[in-house]
Amino acid sequence: MSRNIYASLTMALAISLLPAAANAQDSLRYDIEVRASLSGGENTPFWLANNLQGLGSPRTNSGFVKAGLFRDIDNDRRFSWGAGVSLAGAWRNTSPFYVHELYGEVKYRSLDALLGSKVIKGDFNNPRLSSGNLLYSGNSLPIPQLRLGIFDYAPFWGTDGWLSAKGYIAYGMFTDSRWQKSWSTPDSRRTEDVLYHSKGLWLRGGDAGRFPLVGEIGIEMATQFGGHSYKDGERIDMGHGFKKWWHAFFPHSGKEDTHLGDAVSTEGNMLGTYDFSLSWLPDADWSVKAYYQHYFEDQSQMTFEYGWKDGLWGIEAQLPANRVVSAVVVEYLYSKDQTGAVFNNSSPEIPEQISGRDEYYNHFLYSGWQHWGMGIGNPLIISPLYNRDHDLWFRSTRIEAWHLGLEGSPRPDLGYRMLLSYSRNWGTYTKPLPEMMHNFNALLEVSWRPERLRGWEATLGVAGDTGRLLGKSFGVALTISKTGWLNF
């Protein structure tokens, strides 16, 4: 979709919001944010550029200005609707202008529908302290989509609140075709007009109000399908027909009208996670949550056939009110196995199927699990936008990493956040690094919310990187934001 069309839709939505809010005597929420980072070294320090919903940039001395207007869903009403628009201007980034969010949504009882681009923050990982969800971390720009389902947990009938479920189905489209063409080298792999599908289902058992132990289990899957792939001057048409949409929903190998690679493996770039968590919630003052997220691609590692060695383990603790630490997250990420180094699709000569070398986030036809160069999954698997040769490829997906996040509020108007990450990187099975490379990333962030200036917040972040993978970097970022309400 062209920028002119986006701009027209933005203006139409913004104009339509105001009369609706005025007639309903409702309020509109506005958010304004200005962020600038200054740094020296190889890149903008890692935690000043990642998990910023696609607005962060690895390029030094970058930043953005963002303004948004929103009507939020009222979850206390049986029927409610919401909408939002957020525009951003950026410098030293993938684009000088973004329509960051543009969406409308409705809710009836527990049923929900969303159309457009919206920042969706999951609750499986702490969005401020975690290194990031393995499937959707908030590291890339939102993907425009039609999303239907039950977005918040709803109780099963007859279980008296002890068993709840939520889930969704979504179809959409990636918007970075033009950027890929302008950024990537002529002989590297890139794609155009790629479609998007995702779905998820989670079950929650327990009622914290009656017994403090609550467990969750779920599965979430995503697929890149359709569109066109370019490599070494060759164009491959993956198609957009109804069968492609159906095959994205029910993954299986392609047929006679499919590229050879898809004909012997799952059609499209299919990936997903299993989510498990156990929470102890004795009262409102503190809680502890242990979680494990298992990542898989295609059919491999979806079952116990190859062993579940890869995944993200984490512990999150919310502590009683104090002036030192209010929340702590500790995580361990392992992705070295990828069902092993041996790969073979069955053939008359070798009839045994061996699904190794999964090469997480990468794909032989698609430009990988990225949007506008930033990885959609956990950012510790370094995004293609960092590649100085402009190759859309995750260069090191076999990693072992440790991560610590903590935050606190020494005073009511003062808060801080600290992130520390250390990883060891081996590259991929097909293109291993010459030797294992270390990577260390640190961030200390202090936020001030003056009581006399309600809605204003100033945040100063100091960060640095070291290690051979990304090199040495040091920098600061200043963010000033204002949130408020327009009452009619």
Image (spheres, rainbow, N blue to C red):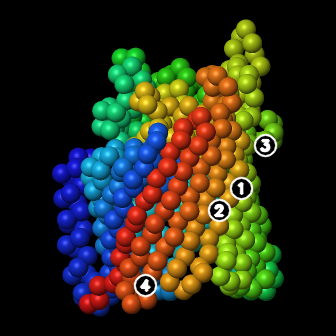
Q: CA distance from mark 1 to mark 4?
A: 33 Å
**373 w.r.t. 254: above or below:** below
- The amino acid at mark 1 is Glu
Q: Residue at x 71, y 27 (%)?
A: 356
- Residue 30 lies left or right of residue 52; in this view the side is left
Q: Which mark is residue 331?
A: 1
Of all residues, the one furthest to the top in this rendering is: 349
Q: Residue at x 70, y 22 (%)?
A: 343
Give the residue number, with chain letter if any, for mark 3. Answer: 308
What is the crowding at mark 3: few (fewer than 14 residues within 10 Å), some, or many (at least 20)? some
- Going from N to C along the chain, the mark reached first, 1 or 3, is 3
Which residue occupies the foreground of this view, 304 or 360? 360
- Going from N to C along the chain, the mark reached first, 2 or 1, is 1
What is the crowding at mark 2: few (fewer than 14 residues within 10 Å), some, or many (at least 20)? many
Report x, y in % for residue 230: 39, 24
> Does residue 309 appear in this view?
yes
- Going from N to C along the chain, the mark reached first, 4 or 3, is 3
Asked if disc 2 and disc 1 are in contact, CB closer than 8 Å, the reply is: yes
Asked if disc 2 and disc 3 are in contact, CB closer than 8 Å, the reply is: no
What is the crowding at mark 4: few (fewer than 14 residues within 10 Å), some, or many (at least 20)? some
Q: CA distance from mark 2 to mark 3?
A: 25 Å
Give the residue number, with chain letter if any, for mark 2. Answer: 405
Report x, y in % for residue 116: 36, 59
- The amino acid at mark 2 is Gly
Give the residue number, with chain letter if any, for mark 4. Answer: 450
- Residue 11 lies left or right of residue 220; in this view the side is left
**Element type at mark 1:** strand
